[in-house]
Image (cartoon, rainbow, N blue to C red):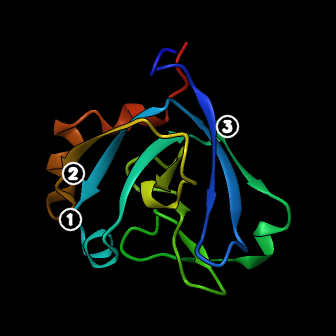
């Protein structure tokens, strides 16, 4: 099996009220960000095009959203347990950032961690490949 071939991963929040599936390779590159929000939550995430992410069942009714700063990022979390299992990142408003620890066990075979200096957001955005993560591969 090619580790770059997209497969379907499933996951969600702690209480399982929010469930989703995401198409991504089994070998995933995640971003460890040190912005004020990500560092407080301990969030490490991978980014996919929005078309590769789908909420399952009635998950939408359990989601609420928090924004701050530029209000570009949409920090979604479960109204019941408070877990942010995915969100729309400022770096990729056309994509979805999926919290790696919220992916159900069994489909991720390898994780590469890349730093993102969210405290110096503009510089880090321009020095990394993060913007390309939400683009569909042809």
Q: Residue 51 has which mark?
A: 3
SS type, badge 3? helix
The answer to whether marks 1 and 2 mark residues whose Cβ atoms lie closer than 8 Å is: yes
- The x and y percentages for residue 89 are 44, 56
SS type, badge 1? loop
Cα–Cα span, label 1 and label 2: 7 Å
**The quadrant where residue 113 appears:** top left
- The x and y percentages for residue 134 are 48, 36
SS type, badge 2? strand
Cα–Cα span, label 3 and label 1: 27 Å
Q: Which residue is mark 2?
A: 116
The C terminus lies in which quarter of the figure? top right
From what the image shows, is residue 29 above or below residue 61?
Answer: above
Nearest the eye: 33 or 4: 4
Q: Residue furthest front?
A: 106
Q: Residue 34 has which mark?
A: 1
Of labels 3 and 2, earlier in sequence is: 3
Nearest the eye: 49 or 21: 21
**The quadrant where residue 82 appears:** bottom right
Left or right of residue 58: residue 34:
left
- The x and y percentages for residue 45 are 39, 53
Q: Residue furthest bottom?
A: 80
């Amino acid at each position: 099996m090619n580790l770059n071939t997209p497969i379907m991963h499933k996951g969600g929040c702690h209480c399982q009220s929010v469930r989703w599936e995401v198409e991504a390779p089994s070998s995933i590159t995640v971003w460890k960000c040190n912005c004020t929000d990500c560092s407080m939550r301990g969030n490490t995430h991978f980014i996919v095009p929005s078309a590769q992410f789908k909420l399952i069942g009635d998950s939408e009714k359990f989601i609420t959203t928090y924004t701050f700063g530029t209000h570009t990022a949409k920090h979604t979390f479960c109204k019941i347990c408070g877990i942010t299992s995915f969100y729309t990142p400022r770096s990729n408003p056309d994509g979805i950032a999926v919290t790696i620890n919220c992916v159900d066990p069994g489909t991720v075979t390898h994780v590469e961690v890349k730093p993102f200096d969210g405290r110096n957001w503009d510089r880090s955005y321009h020095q990394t490949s993060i913007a390309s993560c939400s683009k569909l591969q042809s």
